[in-house]
Amino acid sequence: MSSDLPNYCLDVAQRARAASRLLVRVGGEAKNAWLRRSAEMLGERSADVIAANAKDLAAAAGFGLTDAAVDRLRLDDKGVRAIATALEEIAAQNDPVGEVIESSVRPNGLEILKVRVPLGVVFFIYESRPNVTADAAALCVKSGNAVILRGGKEAAHSSRAIVDILSTAGREYGIPADAVQLVSTADREAVGLFLALAELIDVAIPRGGEGLIRRVSAEAKMPVIKHFDGNCHVYVDRAADLDMAERVLVNAKCQRLGVCNTAESLLVHTDVADAFLPRAAAALIERGIEIRGDDRTRRLVSAAVAATEQDYGAEYLGPIISCKVVDSIDEAIEHINRFGSKHTDAILTTDLNAARRFASEVDTAAAIINASTRFNDGGQFGLGAEIGISTDKFHARGPCGAKELTSYKWVVYGTGQIRE
């Protein structure tokens, strides 16, 4: 470790803390104007961002990135426009800071308010996706937080180009210069040093592989909002519309393989297995998906290979899906609660009682009824963007937008009351 590294990390955190205290003075209109100007500048400087991204793509092979990882890294004109659109959508949302969550007046005349406030300083460690740099910065500042961005080295040039645009726009609208800081070192030791600075950093949010998240959870001295793996399930109930079920399953698994809300496991009720599994398997196999199933699946799908316990708990992020035939909704729920990652799980059914049971009893951040798991996403849920999809239950769960990056304080107005 460089002898300068601890001082560098401390300096970044101290400047973020100072910026967070200035940021609470910046009103919602100024933050929204910054977001809109940043979106405009992304359009104006799209060629610069794409050129920076090209440098990252050229180095991708040297970092050993998979095809799915390169796909997440790649930016073109459409991708830059999507980043700008997300910023505009965040700007259009209500400012969460200062929102009165609830209020009451006590018999003695005290007015009690529960008011939404920023968390303070966010340390965000994330994978090589340039759009996440912009989303995280926008959501943190929108919610009144300073953010320290520790992105993957694989997207260093792209992230720097985006942060430079955000910083330039920020100067026009009074956003503190250190409200958004991109860590300039790829040294892995820096992560541990930041995680020790609980007096300066209020929350750590890791977004990436399971190893990273477990490391952050083990080392952090401050609270962590965790995003573990996405072993997402699609359960086709005995009362499913099978045409709908096939369409939803194909989308949930095949629309994009390398993301956390992709379906990784299929459960089919035995009453519809004969009718559904052969046709669904054909549709998946046609799209290059390997099926790993139990004995009953393999009897119905000759191309299926035997599934293991590990398969049922796997997040493949690739062209594989596990499959099991179940005898009841009870068995489906039990299977999901045993093997699932509490991320996203869907049921296909026309039985409202089955849908309600599934939504109530499956321990998941998002229970989806008759739609694709791919919808568990901040943008799709109307949050504009997300800083992650939390599989925790505290402090936030599911897609984390600006509101999820706040806490609250009690504000009490009196007229001279004293306690007897």
Image (cartoon, rainbow, N blue to C red):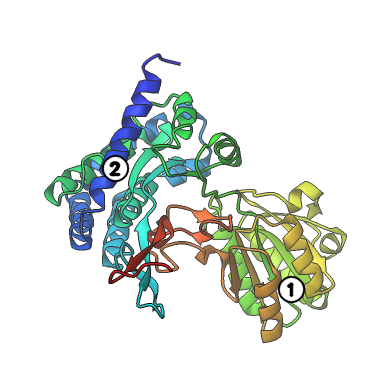
Neighbor class of circle 2 (other Cα within 10 Å; few <14, some 14-19, many 20+) is many
Residue for badge 2: 180
Q: Residue at x 43, y 52 (%)?
A: 387
Q: Secondary structure at mark 1?
A: helix
x then y, percent, for residue 54: 33, 36
Q: Is residue 397 left or right of residue 21?
A: right
x then y, percent, for residue 163: 27, 41
Nearer the N terminus, badge 2 or badge 1? Answer: 2
Q: Is residue 384 visible?
A: no
Q: Is residue 333 left or right of residue 164?
A: right
Amino acid at the residue labelled 2: Val
* Quadrant of the image occupied by residue 113: bottom left
- Spatial distance from mark 2 to mark 1, Cα to Cα? 50 Å
x then y, percent, for residue 233: 67, 62
Using the image, tell me which numbered label, if any, was put on residue 276.
1
Q: Secondary structure at mark 2?
A: strand
Name the residue nearer the viewer: 301 or 322.
322
Q: Is residue 121 above or below residue 374?
A: above
Amino acid at the residue labelled 1: Phe
Q: Is residue 227 left or right of residue 4?
A: right
Q: Residue at x 77, y 76 (%)?
A: 275
Q: Residue at x 41, y 15 (%)?
A: 2
- Residue placed furthest toward the top: 3
Quadrant in which the C terminus appears:
bottom left
x then y, percent, for residue 43: 20, 52
Please tell me whether mark 2 or mark 1 is closer to you in this view.
2
Name the residue nearer the viewer: 117 or 235.
117
- Residue placed furthest toward the front: 420
Using the image, tell me which numbered label, if any, was put on residue 206.
none
* Quadrant of the image occupied by residue 89: bottom left
Neighbor class of circle 1 (other Cα within 10 Å; few <14, some 14-19, many 20+) is many
